[in-house]
């Protein structure tokens, strides 16, 4: 019984210590712009996103929420056959970022990952001379894994800039390179 009380007391002390380091809440909001390269041969496109800083679980690990959007269309034709395809994806998710320490530097590099709900839509229209044409479309929702690496740098006392690489594994895997800014709240 005495051992159980000691263990319970140690767990309680560690839990209080851990919660004292936790600083969660809406700490900043911002946006990003980037180049997205989806899987396959459809080429790169412009992507935009919103980002929210949700604070730190411990000093080195921060939580972010994000919404990413990209769309891409292309056409092909061969001997009178023509097809137009379009793809759109919206990802809504959360990331945990581990910040690496660079002593005597304002640059804060990080690496991390998280999960997102990816809402995807694709549409293909085709036409064949003498035969007519048609169209097909599909909409789906996938749970995706998002891996990130990047760096933040203070631009002003209230604004942080960042550059980020992201690889998303979901229904339409893609690689993105983005730059953006976060407006810090409550400082």
Image (cartoon, helix red, strand yellow):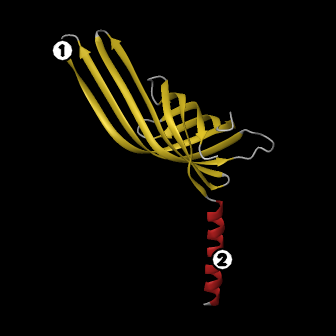
Residue at the extreme bottom of the image, as rendered? 1
Q: Position of residue 102 (x, y in %)?
A: 76, 43
Discs 2/1, front: 2
Up the image or down, 72 lies above or below 15; here it is: above
Secondary structure under tag 2 reads helix
Residue at mark 2? 10
Q: Farthest front residue?
A: 186
Task: Point out the residue furthest to the left here.
Answer: 131
Residue 164, by quadrant, is top right
Quadrant for residue 40, please give it. top left
Mark-to-mark CA distance, 2 and 1: 77 Å
Looking at the image, which residue is at 27% across and 19% down?
126
Query: Which residue is at the front of the view, 56 or 7?
Result: 56
Q: Above or below — where is 141 with respect to 38?
A: below
First of labels 2, 1 by sequence position: 2
Q: Residues within 10 Å of mark 2 (few under 14, many from 20)?
A: few
Are discs 2 and 1 less than 8 Å apart at CB?
no
Q: Kindly identify which residue carries mark 1.
A: 131
Q: Nearer the viewer, residue 97 or 42?
A: 97
Q: Residue at x 50, y 39 (%)?
A: 168
Residue 101: x and y in percent read 74, 47
Badge 1: how crowded within 10 Å, few (<14), some, or many (20+)? few
Residue sitting nearer the eye, 105 or 76: 105
- Side of 63 relative to 170 (left or right): right
The N terminus lies in which quarter of the figure? bottom right
Residue at horizontal 31 percent and vertical 18 percent from the top:
83
Q: Is residue 5 above or below residue 169?
A: below
Instruction: Tell how many labels.
Output: 2
Residue at the image point whose x is 65% and y is 63% from the top: 20
Q: Secondary structure at mark 1?
A: loop
Q: What label does residue 178 carry, if any?
A: none
The percent position of residue 111, horizontal first and vertical second, equals 63, 44
């Amino acid at each position: 019984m005495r051992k159980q009380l000691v263990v319970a007391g140690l767990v309680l002390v560690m839990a209080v210590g851990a919660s004292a380091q936790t600083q969660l809440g809406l700490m900043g909001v911002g946006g990003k712009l980037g180049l997205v390269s989806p899987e396959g041969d459809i080429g790169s496109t412009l992507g935009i996103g919103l980002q929210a800083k949700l604070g730190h679980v411990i000093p080195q690990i921060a939580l972010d929420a994000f919404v990413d959007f990209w769309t891409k269309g292309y056409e092909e034709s061969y001997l009178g056959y023509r097809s137009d395809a379009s793809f759109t994806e919206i990802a809504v998710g959360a990331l945990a970022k581990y910040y690496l320490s660079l002593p005597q530097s304002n640059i804060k590099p990080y690496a991390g990952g998280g999960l997102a709900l990816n809402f995807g839509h694709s549409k293909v229209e085709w036409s064949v001379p003498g035969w007519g044409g048609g169209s097909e479309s599909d909409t789906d929702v996938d749970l995706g894994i998002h891996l990130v690496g990047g760096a933040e740098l203070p631009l002003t006392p209230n604004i942080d800039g960042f550059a980020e690489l992201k690889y998303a594994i979901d229904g339409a895997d893609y690689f993105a390179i983005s730059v953006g800014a976060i407006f810090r709240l409550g400082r």
